[in-house]
Each structure stands twice: as structure tokens, then as C-alpha cells.
Image (tube, rainbow, N blue to C red):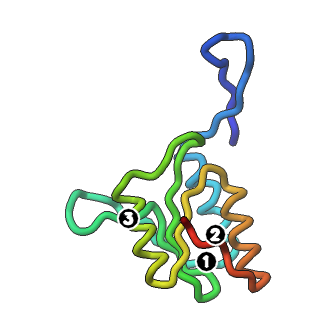
């Protein structure tokens, strides 16, 4: 899943992962764990939302995927705040392992950290 690419200075090789690879990997994990996953297609109409809306063990989770080093947009930030204020969990992930950790916390009955 992870690729290798030469850095601009051409002296070192760094790992990289695309947003599409992040989404594909964590969606597979979610489906294997029995989560309900809805991936709305943004067409410019209606409200903006996150990449995936998930229900896992009765918990509502909004997931936004980004390439490492990138941050959510203002609209995505506002959506994450709204989800959190409504009692859900909102996360921005840059690697599928972050979703694995989140699901493990829910499985253990721990409360995931609230997004700041």
C-alpha cells in the first residue's frame, strides 16, 4: 500500500501514501469489523460533509482522510465540530492505523479523545 518516492533533493527515499489509498484501506477494515459505512458523493448541492459517515457499535463516527501533511478545510473543520457537539466522533486520518486504534478504543469501552 505504501509507495516509495525520491525526495526533491534526490538523496533520500521517503514513504508516501495517497488519500485514495488511506480511504481504501480503512474502509476495508471498517467492513471487516462489521461497521456501517456511508460514503456520500459531493455534487455541490446540499451540506458539505466528511468522506465517510460510520456507525460502529452504536457510535457515530465522521472520518475525513488526508494525505500525510495535509489538513482539513475550513468547511470540513466546521463539520467535525458539529459532529462532536452532537455527541459523535470526528477524526481526520492520514493512515489506516489511526482507524484501527479508534475502533480498538471503542471495543475496549474507552472514550476516544475529543477533537480540539
Query: Which residue is label 1 attached to?
Result: 35
The image shows residue 40 at horizontal and vertical percentages of 38, 66
Query: Which residue is label 3 attached to?
Result: 78
Against 59, residue 80 (above or below) is: above
Q: Earlier in the sequence, mark 2 or mark 1?
A: 2
User: Which residue occupies 65% across, 19% down?
Assistant: 7
State the mark number for residue 30. Answer: 2
The kind of secondary structure element at disc 3 is helix
Q: Give how far apart the Cα atoms at labels 3 and 1 are.
A: 24 Å
User: Which residue occupies 72% across, 65% down?
Assistant: 100
Q: Residue furthest right?
A: 108
Position of the C terminus by quadrant: bottom right
Q: Earlier in the sequence, mark 3 or mark 1?
A: 1
- Dot 1 surroundings within 10 Å: few (below 14), some, or many (20 or more)? some
User: Contact (CB < 8 A) between labels 2 and 1?
Assistant: yes
Q: Give how far apart the Cα atoms at labels 3 and 2 are.
A: 24 Å
The residue mark sitting in front, 3 or 1, is 3
- Dot 3 surroundings within 10 Å: few (below 14), some, or many (20 or more)? some
Against 32, residue 24 (above or below) is: above
Amino acid at each position: 500500500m505504501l509507495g516509495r518516492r525520491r525526495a526533491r533533493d534526490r538523496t533520500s527515499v521517503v514513504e508516501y501514501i495517497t488519500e485514495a489509498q488511506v480511504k481504501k484501506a480503512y474502509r476495508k477494515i471498517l467492513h471487516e469489523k462489521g461497521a456501517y459505512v456511508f460514503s456520500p458523493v459531493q455534487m455541490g448541492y446540499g451540506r458539505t460533509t466528511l468522506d465517510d459517515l460510520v456507525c460502529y457499535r452504536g457510535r457515530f463516527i465522521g472520518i475525513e482522510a488526508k494525505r500525510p501533511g495535509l489538513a482539513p478545510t475550513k468547511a470540513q473543520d466546521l463539520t467535525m465540530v458539529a459532529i462532536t457537539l452532537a455527541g459523535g466522533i470526528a477524526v481526520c486520518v492520514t493512515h489506516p492505523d489511526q482507524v484501527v486504534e479508534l475502533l480498538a478504543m471503542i471495543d475496549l469501552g474507552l472514550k476516544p479523545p475529543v477533537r480540539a
